[in-house]
Amino acid sequence: MIFKFLYEYYSTPWSGGSVVSLYNNIMSQKLEFGSNDEEEKKNPELKEIHKVISSMLAKEEHDRISWESLFSNPLFIDQK
């Protein structure tokens, strides 16, 4: 949902005409955000958002971000 909210141009991070095709695309294609390094330099939060989304969508379960790590990430901490 976060990916879709930020990147309306892309309906989902991966696509496929069938479940098998979608699975194959997930396993073989790199996650792309549609932004470039220059945009990340202008907006440091964007780079952190990309890191969080990438860790949420890691292909291997053991590589995914834990709930504890997610909620302790600076993006989710109230910064008054």
Image (cartoon, grey):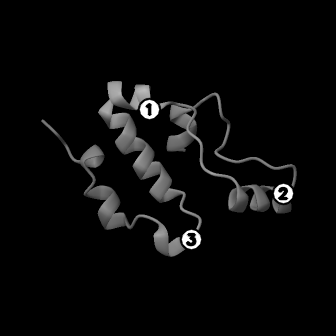
Residue at image point 76% right, 62% down: 23
Dot 1 corresponds to which residue?
Answer: 37
Mark 3 Cα-neighbour bin, 10 Å: few <14, some 14–19, many ≥20: few
Residue at image point 72% right, 59% down: 28
**Relative to 65, is 11 above or below?**
above
Q: CA distance from mark 2 to mark 3?
A: 18 Å
Foreground residue among 79 and 13: 13
Q: Nearer the viewer, mark 2 or mark 1?
A: 1
Dot 3 corresponds to which residue?
Answer: 60
Left or right: 58 with respect to 12? left
Of callouts 2 and 1, which one flags the residue occurring earlier in the amino acid sequence? 2
Q: Secondary structure at mark 1?
A: helix
What type is the residue that disc 3 sits on? Glu
Q: Secondary structure at mark 2?
A: helix
Of callouts 2 and 3, which one flags the residue occurring earlier in the amino acid sequence? 2
Foreground residue among 1 and 34: 34
**Relative to 63, is 17 above or below?**
above
Residue occupying the far front of the picture: 37
Residue at image point 32% right, 36% down: 45
Q: CA distance from mark 1 to mark 3?
A: 26 Å
Dot 2 corresponds to which residue?
Answer: 21
Across and down, in percent, residue 54 comes to 49, 53
Across and down, in percent, residue 22 comes to 78, 56
Left or right: 41 with respect to 53? left
What type is the residue that disc 2 sits on? Ser
